[in-house]
């Protein structure tokens, strides 16, 4: 049977002279197969639902509850699910993690219809509740893949908040015995949430992303897209061990995946979490090579990959060696491989958007524009500049620049949300609902003239196919959720309001 993951390595140069010191880029790329999952991988899901008073506005609560109901209908009786609601306080609606049998699903549906919006927002308390639920699982259950979905439309204004909340969560997460891995997906509704904090919370996990939910119309598609991805997992607990060989040091990484240095500038472990069907992940490293007196084929890196095959349930291991030709002289070079250059551009774009967002957040729009413009220049003069993917990167950066330069200062928070969503998507190479967003420029036009804009249609026309890393499975399930959203929401509108 075909393996769930395929590993490919790239080097910036195919050969470099032996008699000199060199610095060059290397990349490890994992590509997941498109296998449709027939076996059910043991998974535990926790939904943290904000039911503060602001959730009643624009029917958000009804649409979220409808989405949660759709969520549980997609789960197998072998999946476990826990629902935690939070406002000023935190309350578990389910009795811990419950198997999604027809009986438990029906009980939960009844409980959903009784949830009311009231109070403030205790995000830190909700996250610690999820951590406690997962930590208290018996040792034999720690191998189950865990996923947390945090839904909120506001800032943390009760309990821990700001840096204290992030520090506390990071510490607690680092102590958790999660052998199967943890994905934390965070979803921010509307203009008034803290997208920076939500993005940082998601980055504490293995492969979790922050999603900006621009309007109630995006709720079902965005949440269901994330769920569909996890349910299509083909490889779990993916780990890469990189060992630098004689004469090769690893001086840096262009990656947001959790990385641990085990031997200084030599050995590293990278945790990628899970890969969904059709996904790919790329890890770029900067290598420093010493000179040799004689020509040779130099061993650079020993790469070990291990993961749990979601189809077979077996642990798969693979070891490969990256080598480089070191002749006496090198007359010509093939140039940087297109795939490597493309991902260097991805990291350049994501980093610029991240840094630009931070500067914009403190009012330094000139500095933000400078960083973003410099990234455009780098990409547009690169080897892969004409690649459609790189053109999309440039368009996203220009979208951010347009937002910073044209936006009413009162609307700046929405631009920040967009920038956090873009950087999250590109850093993690994972879909996070960006396909469903109207786009900053189109949103500004809508604000100016009040026209009704079909954001998804514009996105589909404006960007290349597959934009936003969305997979076929995610597209299929998110469309299904969108079609059922209004009929489900109407019941909650009648019951809750």
Image (cartoon, grey):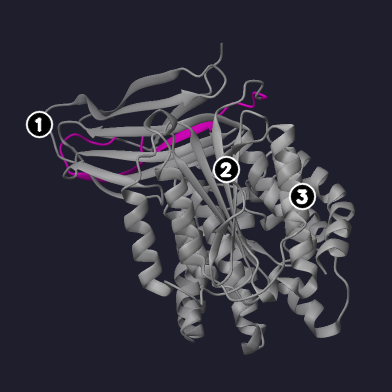
Q: Quadrant of the N terminus?
A: top right
| Sequence order check, earlier mark of 3 and 2 | 2
Instruction: Say which quarter of the image contains residue 95.
Output: top right
Name the mark nearer the viewer: 3 or 1. Answer: 3
Residue 23 among those drawn in magenta: yes
Residue 324 among those drawn in magenta: no
| Sequence order check, earlier mark of 3 and 1 | 3
The answer to whether mark 2 and mark 1 are in CB contact below 8 A is: no
- Report, in whole angstroms, how far the alpha carbon at label 2 lies from the one at label 1: 57 Å
The residue nearer to you, when weighing 245 against 81, is 81
Query: Is 321 situated above or below 45?
Result: above
Which residue is tagged 2?
A: 45
Which residue is tagged 1?
A: 293
Tell me the residue at 60%/79% (across/down): 413
Helix, strand or loop at label 1? It is loop
Residue 358: give x, y in percent of width and height.
Answer: 46, 75
- Report, in whole angstroms, how far the alpha carbon at label 3 lies from the one at label 1: 76 Å
Query: Is 109 situated above or below 325?
Result: below
Which residue is tagged 3?
A: 110
Q: Which span of residues is magenta-colored?
A: 12-36
- Report, in whole angstroms, how far the alpha carbon at label 3 lies from the one at label 2: 19 Å
Q: Residues within 10 Å of mark 1 (few under 14, many from 20)?
A: few
């Amino acid at each position: 049977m075909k393996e769930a993951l395929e590993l490919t390595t790239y080097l910036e140069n195919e050969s470099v002279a032996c008699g000199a010191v060199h610095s060059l880029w290397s990349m490890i790329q994992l590509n997941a197969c498109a296998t449709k999952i027939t076996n059910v991988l043991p998974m535990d899901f926790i939904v943290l639902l904000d039911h503060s008073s602001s959730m009643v506005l624009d029917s958000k609560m009804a649409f979220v509850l409808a989405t949660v109901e759709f969520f549980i209908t997609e789960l197998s009786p072998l999946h476990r699910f826990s629902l935690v609601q939070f406002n000023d306080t935190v309350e578990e609606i389910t009795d811990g993690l419950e198997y999604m049998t027809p009986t438990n699903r029906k009980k939960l549906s009844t409980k959903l219809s009784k949830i009311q919006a009231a109070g403030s927002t205790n995000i830190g308390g909700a996250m610690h509740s999820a951590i406690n639920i997962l930590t208290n699982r018996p040792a034999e259950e720690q191998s189950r893949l865990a996923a947390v979905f945090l839904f909120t439309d506001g800032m943390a204004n009760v309990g821990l908040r700001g840096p204290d909340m992030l520090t506390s969560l990071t510490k607690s997460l680092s102590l958790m015995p999660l052998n199967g891995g943890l994905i934390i997906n965070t979803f921010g509704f509307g203009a008034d949430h803290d997208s920076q904090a939500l993005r940082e919370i998601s980055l504490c996990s293995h492969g979790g992303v922050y999603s900006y939910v621009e309007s109630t119309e995006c709720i079902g598609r965005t949440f269901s897209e994330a769920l569909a991805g996890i349910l299509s997992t083909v490889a779990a607990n993916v780990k890469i061990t990189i060992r630098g060989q004689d004469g090769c040091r690893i001086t840096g990484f262009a990656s947001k995946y959790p990385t641990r240095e085990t031997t200084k500038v030599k050995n590293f472990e990278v945790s990628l979490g899970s890969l969904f069907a059709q996904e790919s992940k790329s890890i770029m490293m900067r290598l420093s090579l010493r000179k040799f007196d004689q020509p040779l084929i130099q061993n650079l890196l020993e790469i070990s990959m291990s993961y749990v095959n979601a189809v077979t349930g077996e642990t798969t291991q693979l070891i490969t060696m990256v080598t480089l030709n070191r002749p006496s002289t090198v007359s010509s070079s093939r140039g940087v491989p297109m795939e490597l250059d493309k991902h260097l551009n991805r990291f350049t774009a994501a980093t610029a958007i991240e840094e630009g967002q931070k500067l914009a957040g403190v009012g330094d729009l000139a500095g933000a524009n400078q960083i973003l413009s410099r990234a455009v220049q780098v990409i547009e003069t690169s080897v892969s500049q004409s690649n459609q993917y790189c053109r999309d990167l440039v368009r996203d950066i220009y979208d951010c620049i347009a937002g910073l330069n044209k936006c009413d200062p009162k609307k700046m928070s929405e631009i920040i949300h967009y920038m956090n969503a873009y950087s999250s998507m590109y850093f993690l190479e994972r879909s996070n609902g960006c396909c469903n967003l109207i786009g900053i420029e189109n949103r500004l036009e809508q604000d100016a003239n009040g026209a009704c804009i079909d954001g998804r249609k514009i996105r589909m026309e404006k960007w290349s196919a597959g934009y936003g890393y969305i997979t076929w499975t995610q597209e299929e399930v998110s469309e299904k959720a969108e079609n059922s959203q209004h009929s489900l929401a109407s019941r909650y509108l009648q019951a809750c309001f």
